[in-house]
Amino acid sequence: MDRTPWAPLAPTRGVPRWLRSRPFLFAAALLGMNIHRRYRLVLPAGLVLLVIGAFALTLPAVGHALELAAQNPLPSLVSLTAACAIATARRKGRLHRSLVDSWLAPLAAPASLLARALFPAALQLLVLAAGLVIALAGGSLSSAAAITLGAIVGGAYLVGSAVGWFSRQAKYAAAPDFHYVTVRKPRWAWAQAPRLEPLSYWAIGQAQVYVKPKVIARAAFVVLLSLPMGIDGASAVAIVAGLWVLLYVGALMLALLRVAFSASRWLALTSLNYVRFAYAVGYRVLLAQIWTWAWILLLTYATGLYRPLRVELLVALFSLILSCAAVAGAVRAAMTSVGMRSP
């Protein structure tokens, strides 16, 4: 008989005892197993991406970039330490919130805060160390540069994790995420005659949550710390602006994925058409991207920067094509995950 303070309802055959005695870690492991069972292509796709990344580390261009980072250790050390401190502080906040809003909170379950905080950092360290070993074995990185980069990564994670963990939490509560969603054209008959139009607003609102000013400030802080000394102000502003655009476009793609999978659970019992679902989720995301890239291209053309204009045009076209593919794939995967069949 299991004498652990928390007895899970799921089968525990083959699960180590130390994992069964830590329900928060056990629930995370079960979540990963369920994702693997539901989406069989996730693990093969991840392995393919790992193989592609390992091959890229053996390229001479990547090795040259790593050599430059080893020759200029201060920007890499400062930026990586700042990023690790911010990630650790955010992880600490999520862990403390889970003690209140998690379904395991009412149970007499150990929180395992330290183990849950150290596991992602240790996994990231293993991935980075494996990348350095692959680059060293592939001949694209010298042994001296590999040792220097290893010391930079280890020191940055050690100092950044300590600074982020012992940082004080904010005493005020941030604005709820739904405050970033604008309600357009409210109708009194929404309960009797619902429409799919609010799904597009939720995608835009979720993207605004991902790129809140606080998030942009932290990302810009890390980027500014990594810039070399002597760079002019115009170039720094241009780099930060490009970072904001890329973050916003990426947030839009991530938001439509989340909204599509969340909405499919509510619409599983309906006979919704695939085209209508995809249009409702993605058309405002595409319009937001077109609007953003149009302003970027217009401002670049007005300043007379014709060389960057060509690059921005190619990036904009690639972004729109990728967004269309993401909408089509996300809606199809969301409908398949809940058993929806398009009539």
Image (cartoon, rainbow, N blue to C red):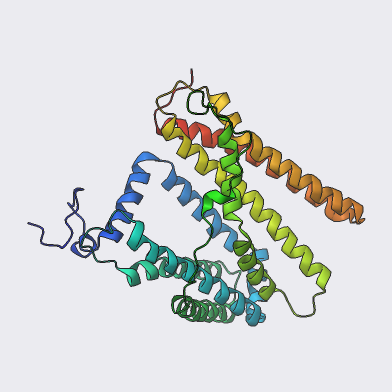
Q: Position of residue 27 (x, y in %)?
A: 29, 54
- Residue 79 appears in which quarter of the rendering? bottom right
Q: Nearer the viewer, residue 80 or 281?
A: 281
Q: Is residue 271 left or right of residue 288?
A: left
Say if 266 sits above or below 311 in the image. above
Quarter of the N terminus within the rendering: bottom left
Say if 91 sits above or below 198 in the image. below
For the view shown, which residue lies furthest in the front direction?
A: 188
For the view shown, which residue lies furthest in the top direction?
A: 343
Q: Position of residue 172 (x, y in %)?
A: 50, 68
Total number of numbered discs in the rendering: 0
- Residue 98 appears in which quarter of the rendering? bottom left
Say if 272 sits above or below 17 in the image. above
Q: Position of residue 337 (x, y in %)?
A: 41, 34
- Residue 187 appears in which quarter of the rendering? top right
Q: Position of residue 248 (x, y in %)?
A: 65, 52
Q: Nearer the viewer, residue 268 or 42?
A: 268
Whether residue 58 is visible: no
Whether residue 293 is visible: yes
Q: Nearer the viewer, residue 266 or 193?
A: 193
Which residue shows up at 78% across the image and 63% down it? 238
Q: Is residue 190 left or right of residue 322?
A: left
